[in-house]
Amino acid sequence: MTVSERPGLGVLLDIDGVLYVGDEPIEGAREALARLRELAAGVRLVTNTTSRSRRAVLEHLRELGFEVAQEEVLTPAAMAVRHCVERGYDSVAVLVSEGLAEDLAPLKPVELGPSAQAIVLGDLGDGFTPELLNRAFRVLMEGAELVALQHNRFWRRADGLALDVGAYAAALEYASGCEATVVGKPARAFFAAALADMGLRRGVMVGDDVEADVCGAIAAGLAGVLVRTGKFRVEALTLLRDGPAASVVDSIADVPALLAADGPDPGA
């Protein structure tokens, strides 16, 4: 069954590691993105980055030659804002990079302290110091909710693999005994929101992270495609061997042909 015979199928693409790595586009990625727009009922670029604002992500994509509209880029920050607003929090401590602060401005962040009802945790890079983690731990022990923008264990920077937000969130969860509310991938709500943004109910997720992208999408009812670029490691294939069915391709350049043929299909 081809894509043309499967109307209403949306495509979700991870960004860093799938479309580019650092300042270098993946070979054939720009052409693949254009082709996917022709094949699918909708395309959204979904990222777990917590070091750049949505605006900065969009600007970087355009600098690398990708033709992308603002509404096509989805980040966890908006989900975090919605989560905190829905729960009526009026005192939220935001632990994110300066670049992401603008996306969380609607929360009117407060200092990390006993009055905080929630902590929104994003990427702080070298700012993840023992002192800061201890302060956050104490606030959680006072009853604050931990809201993690994502739960990735590591990612690939220009200088190699590095710990990601999930590693620090896991440390706080372990120490405090609380479970973080994850608003980015692999949270089911994040994938559902991405599909709803396109007005669709069925989709395919393409990513370089077997846990957050592929397994997370499949658990949410989407099909999954793993690319061998970005943070991909051969060890990741062991998670798919006895786990959920997913397609594995060399890069984003191979995805249009895959979808134009006979798979993957998340079902009706």
Image (spheres, helix red, strand yellow):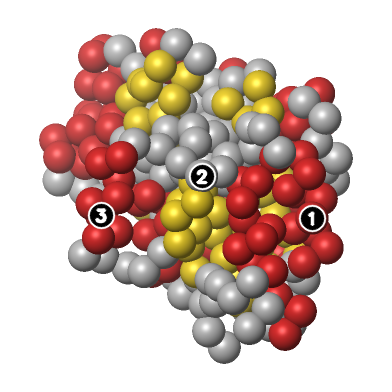
The residue nearer to you, when weighing 245 against 159, is 245
The Cα–Cα distance between marks 3 and 1, rounded to whole angstroms, is: 30 Å
Instruction: Write the residue at 26% across / 65% down.
Output: 243
Instruction: Write the residue at 15% across / 45% down.
Output: 177
Sequence order check: which comes first, mark 1 or mark 2? 1
Q: How many marks?
A: 3
Above/below status of 73 relative to 10: above
Q: Give the residue type at disc 3.
A: Leu
Foreground mark, 3 or 1, reads: 1
Secondary-structure class at tag 3: helix
> Can residue 116 be seen from the camera position used here?
no
Q: Which mark is residue 250?
A: 2
Residue 245 located left or right of residue 170: right
The quarter of the rendered structure image containing the C terminus is bottom right
The residue nearer to you, when weighing 212 against 93, is 212
Please name the residue that numbered disc 1 is placed on.
Answer: 35
The Cα–Cα distance between marks 1 and 2, rounded to whole angstroms, is: 17 Å
Label 1 crowd bin: few (<14), some (14–19), many (20+), radius 10 Å: some
**Quarter residue 68 falls in:** top right
Please name the residue that numbered disc 3 is placed on.
Answer: 239
Above/below status of 243 relative to 98: below
